Image: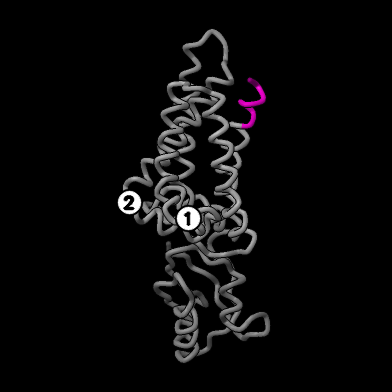
Amino acid sequence: MTHTYQLAGMTCGGCEAKVKSILLALPNVTSVEPSKETNTATISMDKHIGLAQLQTALGGATSKYHISALQRNEAVEQARSWFETYKPILLIFGYITGATLLVQFGNQRFDVMQWMSHFMAGFFLVFSFFKLLNLRGFAESYVMYDVLAKQIPVWAYIYVFVELGLGIAFLVNYNPLLTNSMAFIVMSISIVGVLQSVLNKQKIQCACLGSVFNLPMSTVTIIEDALMICMSGAMLLMM
């Protein structure tokens, strides 16, 4: 992604060179084109960097260089960056939600239990599919934060097939009590490591979609796991 910012304080070619050198040193920044004539800087980056971080790199509030938004409001920019980062998982949830809701059109009434069962089937089948594309890559990422996989590394491999089995079980409505209990236990264990990583602000790649997509561990991962826990728990109570 490439953005152009207002950058005041540059008075000569030396200033341009200094600004370029400083900003290029930031992680995820790939190119910087400052201009003292227009008082702007065009920055290309692999991942959106907030204005506060850019200003800190330039020397903070007391620096002679002051960077600010030029074309877009910062809040809008951050929202766009968030959507671009999590677009794969948002699309997957959208597809699963839409498909499972369409199934209910064939019923005389909306069957909440059936819808949740189909939703969880779609969730586990799709997510296990992406993990199976690179099973080893998933396992290497998963052991970095999952509390059980840290102690028993082979669990990272077993977990994928547990997800696949749960997906099939939810789809065919196999022993709902056992299936929901297993889902509740497995996802409850999984969310512990996710919570620890997010609360400790660790920059770890989320392995929810295997190694196919580079998704950061965040509150989105917590919501994803918590949703499965809530659905399986709700179905157990409704039984």
Residue 148 versus residue 64: which sits nearer the camera? Answer: 148
Q: What type is the residue that disc 2 sits on?
A: Asn
Q: What type is the residue that disc 1 sits on?
A: Ile
Magenta stretch: helix, strand or loop mostly = helix
The stretch of residues the image draws in magenta is 233-239
Q: Residue furthest left?
A: 133
**x 42%, y 61%: residue:** 1
Residue 126 versus residue 103: which sits nearer the camera? Answer: 126
Q: In this view, does 220 lie above or below 123?
A: below
Q: Which one is in front in this view, the residue at disc 2 or the one at disc 1? A: 1
Say left or right for 33 vs 148.
left
**x 63%, y 32%: residue:** 233
Label drawn at residue 134: 2
237 in the magenta segment: yes
Label drawn at residue 62: none
Count residues near mark 1 (Cα–Cα under 10 Å), then give few for <14, some for 14-19, many for 20+.
few
Q: Is residue 90 above or below residue 170?
A: below
Kindly identify which residue carries mark 1: 152
Say left or right for 161 vs 183.
left
